Amino acid sequence: MKAAEKFVLICCLFQGVLCREFSISLPESIEALRGLCVLIPCSFDFKEQYDHQLQNNPRGVWYKGDSWAKHKVFSSKTTEGNKIDGKIIGDLYRKNCTTIFYNISESDSGEYYFRIVFGNLKYIYPSSLYLNVRASPISPSITLYKEDQGKVEDQNEVVEGTSVSLICSARSPCPFNPPIFTWNFLSEERRQEQNHNARFRSSQLNFKATRLHHGVNFTCTATYQLQNKNKSAQSSFRLHVLYAPRNTSVSASPSASVLLGSSVSLSCSSDANPAVLNYTWYRENGEQIGTGKHLTISKTASTNRGLYYCRAQNQLGDQKSSVYLDVLYAPQVSPSSSCNSALDLIMCSCEVHGNPSPKLVWHLSGQTVLPSESTPIREESVGDTGLKSFITIHQSFIDTPTLQCIGINKLGVDTHLFNPLKAECRHTAVSYLVLSLSVVLLLCVGIISFLICKLKQLFGKIKVLKSGNVYASLQLSAPNTYEILQTHRERRLQENKV
Ligand SMILES: *[C@@H]1O[C@H](CO)[C@@H](O)[C@H](O)[C@H]1NC(C)=O
Ligand SMILES: *[C@@H]1O[C@H](CO)[C@@H](O)[C@H](O)[C@H]1NC(C)=O
Ligand SMILES: *[C@@H]1O[C@H](CO)[C@@H](O)[C@H](O)[C@H]1NC(C)=O
Ligand SMILES: *[C@@H]1O[C@H](CO)[C@@H](O)[C@H](O)[C@H]1NC(C)=O
Ligand SMILES: *[C@@H]1O[C@H](CO)[C@@H](O)[C@H](O)[C@H]1NC(C)=O
Ligand SMILES: *[C@@H]1O[C@H](CO)[C@@H](O)[C@H](O)[C@H]1NC(C)=O
């Protein structure tokens, strides 16, 4: 390997130190706003052979035009003859050609070339910058960041509860007049401004996504303060918040209180995003009774009374709501209502069902019976729609022909007529005792009658002999006493038996 080749190789290995070329670092283009300043970040380099000359009063010159024809618009040497008011704020001794042009106008739009001049070096860099001066600012951009996924491209959906950030970024061509950001929404959310790059400014809105943010336009406005007026540009971002069903409710048509036998339709509604996938209906006991938004019962029965739950489901969860369905009906006296009698007491019970829960009234011979010591009345409820009442009547009232039990609610009246004298009486232990005693008595009467009869025959024979009146009177009176008792008992027995 020749010495020259070795040198080239080393040159290449240490490029930038030993073999530097002319180079410039400029943005390809810059968007500027009319009336504002514009900052042009710039740095340059040159062949190392000129290094020692840099200390010799370097100056920068900006040309405007194209590769074929350029004209000088700005020189750092003098302010006279400069077409653009500006300043090189970078340190040329440190190869920094960062420049500011003040009060730029639309006619300043075009290609710009930089030329460096020091010692005996005058070099115009072939790379150019395109300066685009606008009358009004470019709209800012809004980007969504999710806590778990970072930046979210082409998407505006978030699940409720996710911590999100919206970052509004706007160009800041002039460092002295950065844009001021305003958000239309929710001042309470944390906001912070960032200067993430010399030519951009941004404002970050941090919040936890809730349903309230769904469909909301988040508008970010960037305002540029010019000498005598403000110019602003804005962008909107519409957030889609996905959430489980909420505000689930059940309504009943025509009403949640319906007459027995009529139809009722229950409807479930819920707010969910994405929309509710399915609705499920079930009763208190967990039994599923239907699906779909509506549940219709075409003919209500009393068993339809109770709570109805609707569960609304989507991919994110579920929510339930309930309605109490009341089935109304007029009072109905139960056929099990009956009377018992024992000794001189008659006890009757009456059971009545109805919704709303009925009242129960006793009528004795058309007169309302009020509970008293002589006619005690005791009530107990049967389920939540029934009432059972017990009345006790003393035998002294037995002449009274009618006893009525009357059930009353707002939908109607039902009456049951008892006949306590003949009525549906059952034999209680006491009445069985009475019956047995009667039978024993009857037997006794029969036996005694038989004996008396035999005695009569015997004494008849004696009478023929002695003719005694004493026995005859006995014979007449005693059986009669028994007979009266006997018929009385038989009557009562008949009453009891019917
Ligand atoms: C050039 O100068 C500007 C203005 O002083 C400064 O902001 C920038 O950081 C400098 N660039 C470099 C590469 O040093
Ligand atoms: C900025 O430039 C416009 C026209 O280019 C001029 O009318 C205006 O006076 C200038 N403003 C300042 C502060 O130099
Ligand atoms: C420009 O905007 C700023 C901040 O919003 C405000 O204080 C100022 O009064 C506005 N100037 C004009 C000329 O509207
Ligand atoms: C939301 O912003 C978009 C785009 O800026 C706009 O078209 C739409 O009308 C806005 N909607 C509301 C409700 O403000
Ligand atoms: C919906 O639910 C929210 C709470 O989740 C409540 O603040 C709001 O009032 C409800 N809206 C309606 C119409 O019920
Ligand atoms: C309702 O949707 C959920 C969620 O997709 C599913 O798991 C469930 O089986 C569905 N129920 C009915 C009754 O379709």
Image: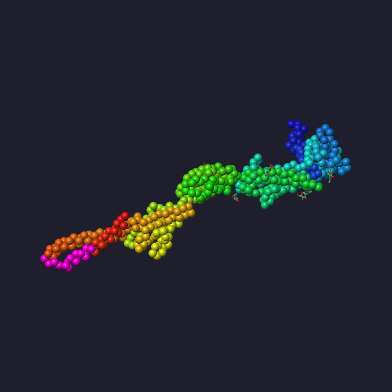
Relative to the observer, which residue lies in front, 297 or 8?
297
* Residue 175 visible in the displayed image: no
Instruction: State ligand 2's quadrant.
Output: top right
Q: Is residue 319 above or below residue 367?
A: above
Residue 468 among magenta residues: yes
**Considering depth in this image, is 23 or 400 the residue closer to the camera?**
400
- The answer to whether residue 62 is above or below residue 372 is above
- How many labels sit on residues? 0
Q: Residue furthest top?
A: 1
Q: Quadrant of residue 231?
A: top right
How far from the left and from the top, in percent, is residue 330? 46, 52
Left or right of 336 on screen, residue 493 = left
Q: Range of the magenta residues?
A: 465-480
Say left or right for 219 vs 420. Answer: right
Quarter in which the N terminus is drawn: top right
Colour scheme employed for the rendering of this structure: rainbow
Residue 418 picture location, percent across and down:
37, 56
In depth, the one of 229 and 205 nearer the eye is 229
Indicate left or right for 218 with 271 as reference. Answer: right
Q: Residue at x 57, y 45 (%)?
A: 316
- Residue at figure coordinates x 47%, y 54% from the top left: 409
Does the magenta stretch mainly form a helix, a strand or a loop? Answer: helix
Q: Where's the C terminus, which quadrant?
A: bottom left
Q: Residue 271 at what x, y percent from top left?
A: 58, 46
The image quadrant of residue 88 is top right
